[in-house]
Image (cartoon, rainbow, N blue to C red):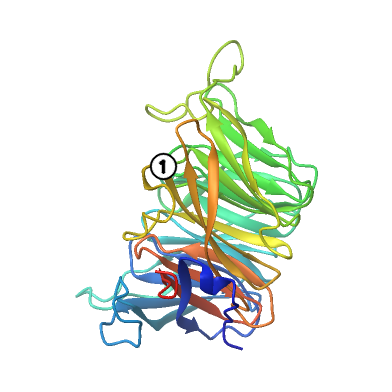
Amino acid sequence: MDPGTDSDSKNLPCRIYPVAVLEGHSDRVWNVAWNPVQHLIASCSADKTVRMWSYSHSPNADYPSGDEPTPCVFTPATEIATGHRKTVRTIAWSPSGKNLATASFDSTVSVWERVPGDENGEELGEWECLSTLEGHENECKSVAYSSDGNLIASCSRDKSVWIWEVQPDADFECLSVLMEHTQDVKCVAWHPQEELLASASYDDNILLYVDDPQDDWFAFTTLSGHTSTVWSLAFSPCGSMLASASDDRTIRIWQRYPKPPVVGANQLVRVGKGSTAAEGEWKAAFTITNAHERSIYSVTWGKTPPGHSSIGASENDRGWIASTGGDGHIKVWNISVDGDRNVSHRLVADVADAHGLVDVNCVSWSPLEPGILASAGDDQKARVWHITRNSETN
């Protein structure tokens, strides 16, 4: 079934235009991840594989005239038969774009790298598993690289969050096992600039963690307010806010305020050169109620694309959040903050039946192509979208 457009979405300032359908998986697609430096996108599935597509700009593609950027054409690149014994639930690229981590329901995380090609460097080799990270006692639900690529976080149905250090020669050391949640942990997300980790759980809470250089990683605050499972987290590009999505059909925005908490013996925990990850107080700033008609499974936060800054208060613009879930809609929200740090939102675009009459499991903004969004669904497909101006309202 093709994506639908209802009468309400026609009155919004933008539309979500389909660019490509990425086929090949034989079971539901759980997650999509854009390579941060290469023109490559990966997807993972209940069929235990990872598939990749390369993309390039094509000025001759069938696309609405006047829309920028030039649309992308996607070409199948490779398939990784991961060797995972069960569903591959989540994938994450390293910041360098050279490594890919896969988290599976078989309780393991694997880290992959593409081996060198021929002597002339003209052909790239196959993807090779560098290491398998073991320790979780149940299904791995999420995996994420820190912004500098030196740390990996994973979480599981066993209620734990593990932090691994990436070492030379494909070696990985477990730095910490955090057992702060009381239920299944659904998601982990790193701050975009700092060694600050967030996790979300079936216990309805969000925890924030930092490293105490004199001791160990610990949860320095709990963000409570959701009334059901928290499925997904996304930091704002500037790092001052965090979005969360839940079974309670809300998107909550949490903001860091300048009041510094006291940690330990009247000291602030400082992590990384020039960074104070535990400084400030994270508090609820805004709630988008009834954001979707059913559970919200995924949120992603990106910068407002060029040419769209007039949508919302441009001088206070904090970017666009895309969300999706069990109602099959993909929605895009503009987030703004005024001089008094009050948060506001505006629904920018909405598409119904994005993957037909099935759940949509994931949305992800492209880091290289402004306004380009990918999604993954139970229809065994990944899809690519472009947010364009709505000619009927502009």
Residue 156 placed where, x, y %? 70, 53
Q: Where 310 sits versus 358, above or below?
A: above
Task: Provide the residue designation for mark 1.
Answer: 316
Q: Residues within 10 Å of mark 1 (few under 14, many from 20)?
A: some
Residue 353 placed where, x, y %? 63, 79
- Between 176 and 337, the one lying in front of the other is 337
Q: Is residue 41 left or right of residue 203?
A: left
Residue 259 placed where, x, y %? 54, 21
Residue 236 placed where, x, y %? 48, 46
Give the secondary structure at mark 1.
helix
Please give the name of the residue rendered at 49% of the width and 83% of the height, measured from the top-left corner: 21
Q: Quadrant of residue 81?
A: bottom right
- Between 394 and 365, the one lying in front of the other is 394
Residue 153 visible somewhere in the drawing: no
Q: Is residue 359 left or right of residue 365?
A: right
Please give the name of the residue rendered at 37% of the width and 28% of the height, measured from the top-left corner: 273
- Image quarter hosting the C terminus: bottom left
Q: Where 37 sits versus 167, above or below?
A: below
- Number of numbered discs overlaid on the protein picture: 1
- Between 180 and 290, the one lying in front of the other is 290
Q: Is residue 30 left or right of residue 241?
A: right
Q: Quadrant of residue 360?
A: bottom right
Please give the name of the residue rendered at 54% of the width and 50% of the height, measured from the top-left corner: 345
- Image quarter hosting the N terminus: bottom right
Which residue is outermost to the top? 266
Residue 24 visible somewhere in the drawing: yes
Q: Could you tell me the amino acid type at mark 1? A: Asn
